[in-house]
Image (spheres, rainbow, N blue to C red):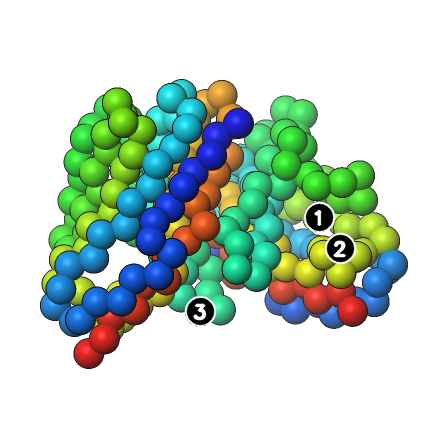
Amino acid sequence: GAGVSQSPSNKVTEKGKDVELRCDPISGHTALYWYRQSLGQGLEFLIYFQGNSAPDKSGLPSDRFSAERTGGSVSTLTIQRTQQEDSAVYLCASSYMGRPSTDTQYFGPGTRLTVL
Amino acid sequence: GENVEQHPSTLSVQEGDSAVIKCTYSDSASNYFPWYKQELGKRPQLIIDIRSNVGEKKDQRIAVTLNKTAKHFSLHITETQPEDSAVYFCAASSLGSNYKLTFGKGTLLTVNP
């Protein structure tokens, strides 16, 4: 079946503009995670959605970052008033139930964001 | 919160040799430890994982060991091949953290033919 998909694959924007990044998880997966991978850094957790529960936003670096998940499927990560330090690859992952005893996180191809 | 340290940051081996990458974690509640392989420009791919109720797991040329007392786990690749060249990330997670993964900073493995 289809894996996790993300769009766009690349996004170049000017400092101060808003951007929206989209993630389509694997069908049937109830848990969805956003991570950020900066140059030379590991992967950094941003936000987690599980079913209809309140999202875990503990990894969002500032209030310029927000995310939503509509209908328990597609998710959109929004970055307002982008800064150069926001430049990174934004990765989405999904899993069946968010429990490692039953599933694994599968990653999308990422969106490479460049803020000029 | 959880902190994961990974060593070495770079590793170069000859084809056919073994490679070992080590990680330590800080949160004793962590109970799930996956390893991801990321080739240049590609998405991270899970290659093996281990849960805290076992000490070792093998899958062909790849094995992972876990020492809960010392809070460290290691990836072992035997009979390395050039296609094993990639960045490898270890990670840790737990129920209390909503299973969000805390990653190490990665190891760039180069297998020389």
- Residue A46 lies, in percent from the top left, at 62, 41
Residue with the mark numbered 1: A77
Give the residue at x 85% y 53%: A81
Both on one chain, marks 2 and 1?
Answer: yes
Asked whether, in this view, residue A84 is left or right of residue B48, the answer is right
* Residue B94 appearing in the image: yes
- Residue closer to the observer: A40 or A100: A40
Residue with the mark numbered 3: B40
- Residue B13 lies, in percent from the top left, at 21, 67
Pointer 1: residues within 10 angstroms few (<14), some, or many (20+)?
A: many
Residue with the mark numbered 2: A20
Quarter occupied by residue A71: top right
* Residue type at tag 3: Leu
To which chain does the residue with label 1 belong?
A: A
- Residue B63 lies, in percent from the top left, at 18, 46
CB-based contact (under 8 Å), mark 2 and mark 1? yes
* Residue type at tag 1: Leu
CB-based contact (under 8 Å), mark 1 and mark 3? no
Pointer 3: residues within 10 angstroms few (<14), some, or many (20+)?
A: few
To which chain does the residue with label 3 belong?
A: B
